[in-house]
Image (cartoon, coloured by chain):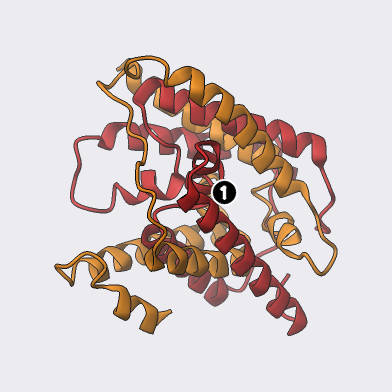
Amino acid sequence: MTPEFTPVSSLVGGLLIGLSASLLLFSHGKVSGISGIYGGLLTPPTPDRSYRVSFLGGLVSAGIVLYLLRPDLFPAADVTAPAGLTALAGILVGYGTRLGNGCTSGHGVCGLARFSRRSLVATVSFIAAGAATVLIVRTLGGVG
Amino acid sequence: MKGNVLAWLAGALFGVGLVVSGMTDPAKVQGFLDFFGAWDPSLAFVMGGAVTLHLVLLRLVTRRAAPLFDTRFHLPTRTDVNQKLVVGAVVFGVGWGLAGYCPGPGLVSLGTGGATAMIFVGAMTIGMVLQHQVAHMHTEPGGGLTTVVGKS
């Protein structure tokens, strides 16, 4: 599980993400912000539910098929993070992405591609906060 | 309906991109955030590739009068950098660093049936609903700010 630098596959994966974001913009005129697409299903129904359900269905389907074909691309089944820590992290991610109107995809990909100042500030902020968190956790000798 | 097929395809492409790029491995994401340790720059290549291609295609796509299945493009127009934006991004960043999952890879990893992904997405859903509840406790926009700062 030691992370290795994978410039080629990461660049290829990034290009697929950029293509996906462009496709959704072309078909529905929407931003591919995962937290926004998912979060929009949790609030009172909006008329645009069907594209959200379809997009997220595609996302999860990709996970199912690739896990069957290439389980090595996911963490080994016996590698599980402490449940309490994962739950805390999930709550923070859910709360924060909705408060800040976006996550890595909405701000970090779509927003930066539009040269949005809000997205640049958000991206720098979440990377800095994430780095500080990892530094603190590693210093304390905890997970990771 | 054709629109849903394209939205499904976009989601599937996004998911494949996340898996191929290594972003469904939380250790790899945390490796990128570990600037002072064994730094793994891979995530910068993911974002770099995605942003570069999208910034070109975005300009071609928005030359059209409208998207295929809607009457107009729905692109954010806000330019104000406010406290909500920064606090939200920081809260998200802390969770991202703790788990190594952001919303996309979390949802894709549901496909593995793994316990960690299930717990993460379940908790993320609770966090999103919680934010919605807090934000709507106040009638005035931005009125939820004090509550939010106090909680984070």
User: Horizontally, is B140 left or right of B128 in the view?
Assistant: left
Protein chain holding label 1: B
User: Horizontally, is B143 left or right of B67 in the view?
Assistant: left
Would residue B9 be visible to someone looking at this image? no
Q: Chain A drawn in what color?
A: red
The percent position of residue A106, horizontal first and vertical second, equals 47, 45
Q: Residue at horizontal 57%, vertical 40%? A: A63
| Badge 1 amino acid | Pro
User: Horizontally, is B146 left or right of A21 in the view?
Assistant: left
Q: Residue at horizontal 39%, vertical 63%? A: B82
Quarter of image, res A85: bottom right
Nearer the observer, B122 or A3: A3
Nearer the observer, B134 or B115: B134
Q: Chain B drawn in what color?
A: orange
At mark 1, the secondary structure is helix
Would residue B72 be visible to someone looking at this image? yes
The percent position of residue A136, horizontal first and vertical second, equals 69, 79
Q: Is residue A13 above or below residue B102?
A: above
